[in-house]
């Protein structure tokens, strides 16, 4: 498979064109937005917890950006459904990258993990879950470069 | 610099409804051409063009207010200069067809 076929394999294009969990949730329990100023990718994620106040019952996002950033965020919403806020707070980016399953250059890597960072910020703001150093500096009016 | 050959070739392509070219008409242009392919983000356009051997820039080009005004997140930007040859334009256009084919647009 060529490099091109790998990066833009069918599953990526499918998530890009028909994103799962698309659209923000009304009366969300947690929400954050973030962007990558170098390329202008933007993602906003909202989360609603279940009765236990911990488990992610529903998650939705809106954003615009390259196929990688939007497809990765779409995949993320499937990945974290039913997990608790504290589980997601420590979710390693490698788990998402494995799901995405394509080779990424350092620049495209930032596209791929933008959504995960925004989600961690949302949970941190709502539940006070730990926010690792790597994700600090992301927030409503902040971005990571 | 005479860009008539590139503009003629380019204009032919950019009349396609799926491709919007920003900026003044061809006779008042320099060799810089910013454009948008419908439903494909410029970084994806640039990535595929790169694999096809065509180097372009993509992004907001540090002109975020202009991007907002144009209603786009970013644009793809091709630059022609003294060393560019007509075949470069053909190659760019072939590359854009490859982008469309990959994204199914």
Image (spheres, rainbow, N blue to C red):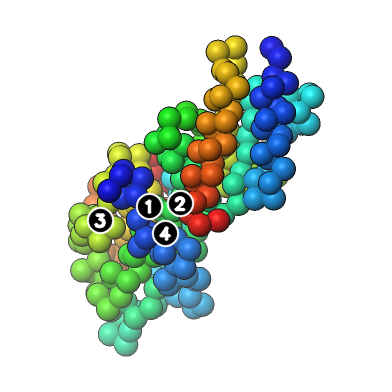
**Both marks 4 and 3 on one chain:** yes
**Both marks 3 and 2 on one chain:** no
Residue A99 relative to residue A67: left or right: left
Residue A81 relative to residue A22: left or right: left
- How packed is label 1: few (under 14 Cα within 10 Å), some, or many (20 or more)? many
Label 3 and label 2: CA atoms lie apart by: 18 Å
- Which residue in the protein does label 3 denote? A101
Is mark 4 in CB contact (under 8 Å) with mark 1? yes
Label 1 and label 3: CA atoms lie apart by: 11 Å
Using the image, tell me which numbered label, if any, was put on residue B102. 2
Q: Residue B89: x, y in percent?
A: 59, 28
**Chain letter, disc 1 residue:** A
- How packed is label 4: few (under 14 Cα within 10 Å), some, or many (20 or more)? some
Label 4 and label 1: CA atoms lie apart by: 6 Å
Is mark 2 in CB contact (under 8 Å) with mark 4? yes
Is mark 4 in CB contact (under 8 Å) with mark 3? no
- The image quadrant where one finds the C terminus of chain B is bottom right
Residue at 57% across, 43% down: B74
Using the image, tell me which numbered label, if any, was put on residue A8. 1
Residue B33 relative to residue A93: left or right: right
Label 1 and label 2: CA atoms lie apart by: 7 Å
Is mark 1 in CB contact (under 8 Å) with mark 2? yes
Q: Can I make out residue A32 in this image?
A: no
**Both marks 1 and 2 on one chain:** no
- The image quadrant where one finds the N terminus of chain B is top right
Using the image, tell me which numbered label, if any, was put on residue A13. 4
Residue A129 relative to residue A145: left or right: left
Select label 3 or label 2 by which is in front.
2
């Amino acid at each position: 498979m060529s490099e091109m076929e790998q990066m833009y394999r069918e599953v990526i294009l499918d998530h890009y064109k028909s994103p799962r969990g698309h659209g923000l949730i009304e009366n969300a329990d947690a929400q954050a937005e973030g962007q990558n100023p170098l390329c202008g990718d933007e993602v906003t994620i909202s989360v609603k917890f279940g009765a236990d106040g911990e488990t992610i019952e529903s998650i939705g996002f809106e954003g615009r950006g390259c196929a990688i950033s939007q497809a990765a965020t779409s995949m993320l919403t499937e990945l974290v459904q039913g997990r608790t806020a504290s589980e997601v707070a420590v979710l390693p980016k490698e788990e998402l990258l494995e799901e995405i399953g394509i080779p990424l250059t350092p620049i495209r890597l930032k596209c791929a993990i933008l959504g995960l960072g925004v989600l961690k910020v949302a949970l941190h703001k709502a539940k006070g879950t730990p926010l690792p150093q790597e994700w600090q500096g992301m927030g409503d009016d902040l971005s990571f470069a | 610099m005479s860009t008539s050959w590139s503009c003629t070739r380019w204009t032919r392509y950019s009349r396609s409804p799926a491709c919007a070219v920003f900026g003044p008409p061809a006779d008042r242009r320099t060799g810089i051409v910013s454009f948008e392919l419908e439903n494909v983000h410029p970084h994806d356009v640039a990535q595929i063009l790169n694999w096809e051997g065509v180097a372009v820039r993509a992004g907001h080009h540090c002109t975020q207010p202009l991007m907002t005004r144009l209603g786009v997140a970013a644009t793809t930007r091709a630059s022609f200069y003294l060393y560019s040859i007509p075949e470069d334009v053909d190659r760019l256009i072939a590359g854009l067809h490859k982008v469309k084919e990959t994204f199914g647009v």
